[in-house]
């Protein structure tokens, strides 16, 4: 029996999904909050938390593979990794917002925990 590997498809192809998660993670680390749909926020959470954990462990190659912005890359290692050094996980929080006016999609705000 064929089983899926989990995760939401979000209505896009695999390369588009990976690029979207990379871009959203970059925006999250730069601005420390991103407003998006709940399903995208739920997919972004483990992606972003793995990047922060890799930065804490000093794995530059793992972070560089997914973060293509030099400013964000530097911020991850110099600001965010020391900030979460004593925290074992749970670096992000998802807050539910009012539905979007155009299509009534569920919106959320994903933020970094301070």
Image (spheres, rainbow, N blue to C red):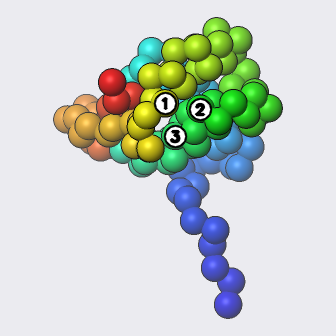
Disc nearer the start of the sequence (1/2): 2
Check disc 3 and report the residue beneath it.
Answer: 49
User: Does the image show residue 90?
Assistant: yes
Check disc 1 and report the residue beneath it.
Answer: 85
Residue 13 rendering spot, x and y as whole percentages: 69, 49
Which quadrant of the figure contains the N terminus?
bottom right
Residue 20 rendering spot, x and y as whole percentages: 61, 34
Disc nearer the start of the sequence (2/3): 3
Find residue 72 and name its label.
none
Left or right: where does residue 106 sit relative to residue 63? left
User: Does the image show residue 20?
Assistant: no
Q: CA distance from mark 1 to mark 3?
A: 13 Å
The residue furthest left is 98
Q: Residues within 10 Å of mark 2 (few under 14, many from 20)?
A: many
Mark 1 and mark 2 residues within 8 Å of each other at the beta carbon:
yes
Find residue 56 and name its label.
2
Which quadrant of the figure contains the C terminus?
top left
Q: Residues within 10 Å of mark 3 (few under 14, many from 20)?
A: some
Q: Residue 78 falls in which quadrant of the image? A: top right
Left or right: where does residue 70 sit relative to residue 85? right
Disc nearer the start of the sequence (1/3): 3
* 28 vs 77, nearest the viewer: 77
Q: Is residue 44 above or below residue 75?
A: below
- In the image, which is nearer the foreground, mark 2 or mark 3? 2
The residue furthest front is 86
Residue 81 rendering spot, x and y as whole percentages: 54, 25
Element type at mark 1: loop
């Amino acid at each position: 029996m064929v089983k899926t590997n989990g995760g939401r498809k979000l209505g896009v192809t695999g390369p588009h999904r990976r690029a979207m998660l990379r871009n959203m993670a970059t925006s999250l680390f730069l601005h420390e909050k991103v407003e998006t749909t709940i399903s995208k926020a739920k997919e972004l959470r483990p992606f972003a938390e793995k990047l922060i954990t890799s930065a804490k462990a000093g794995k530059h190659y793992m972070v560089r593979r997914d973060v293509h912005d030099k400013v964000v890359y530097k911020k991850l290692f110099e600001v965010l990794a020391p900030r979460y050094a004593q925290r074992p996980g749970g670096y992000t929080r998802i807050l539910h917002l009012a539905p979007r006016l155009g299509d009534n999609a569920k919106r959320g705000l994903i933020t970094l925990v301070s």
